[in-house]
Image: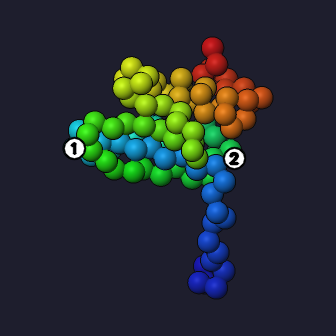
Amino acid sequence: MPFDDFSAPPVAKTRIVIHYCNLCRWMLRAAWLAQELLSSFPDDIDEVSLHPGDGGVFAIWLGDTLVWERQRDGGFPEAKELKQRLRDLVCPERDLGHSDR
């Protein structure tokens, strides 16, 4: 593909940030959840960003909305519950199939 044919992706409208504690070695968990979300919402999510931090942080943001926070919500999210919360914010009419049962 010639370089002239390349174009940058559009500015993300639906951007998710997973802020995780690098010192706690939670990057793999963050990356796995990012993959789960991108696989489940291929047409609804424009971007998932992994943001390393410290201090035991594990928080998932949709724009300015805090979707999950480890201390507030009692641990790490199960993929099913995270997908349901995100769906309710991004596309509430959407059926998640087995994740809704």
Q: Position of residue 18 (x, y in %)?
A: 44, 43
Question: Furthest residue to the right?
Answer: 93
Marks 1/2: CA–CA distance = 33 Å
Image-quadrant location for residue 7: bottom right
Where residue 96 sits, quadrant-wise, is top right
Among the two numbered marks 1 and 2 on one chain, the one whose residue lies closer to the N terminus = 1
Q: Which residue is mark 1?
A: 23
Q: Can residue 28 be seen in this snapshot? A: no
- Residue 70 horizontal side relative to residue 98, left or right: left
Q: Quadrant of the N terminus?
A: bottom right
Residue at image coords 53%, 33%: 67
Count of marks overlaid on the render: 2
Q: Amino acid at mark 1?
A: Leu
Amino acid type indicated by mark 2: Asp
Q: Secondary structure at mark 1?
A: loop
Count residues near mark 2 (Cα–Cα under 10 Å), then give few for <14, some for 14-19, many for 20+: few
Q: Which residue is mark 2?
A: 43
Q: Is 11 drawn above or below residue 74 in the view shown?
A: below
Residue found 38% across the figure and 28% down from its top: 70
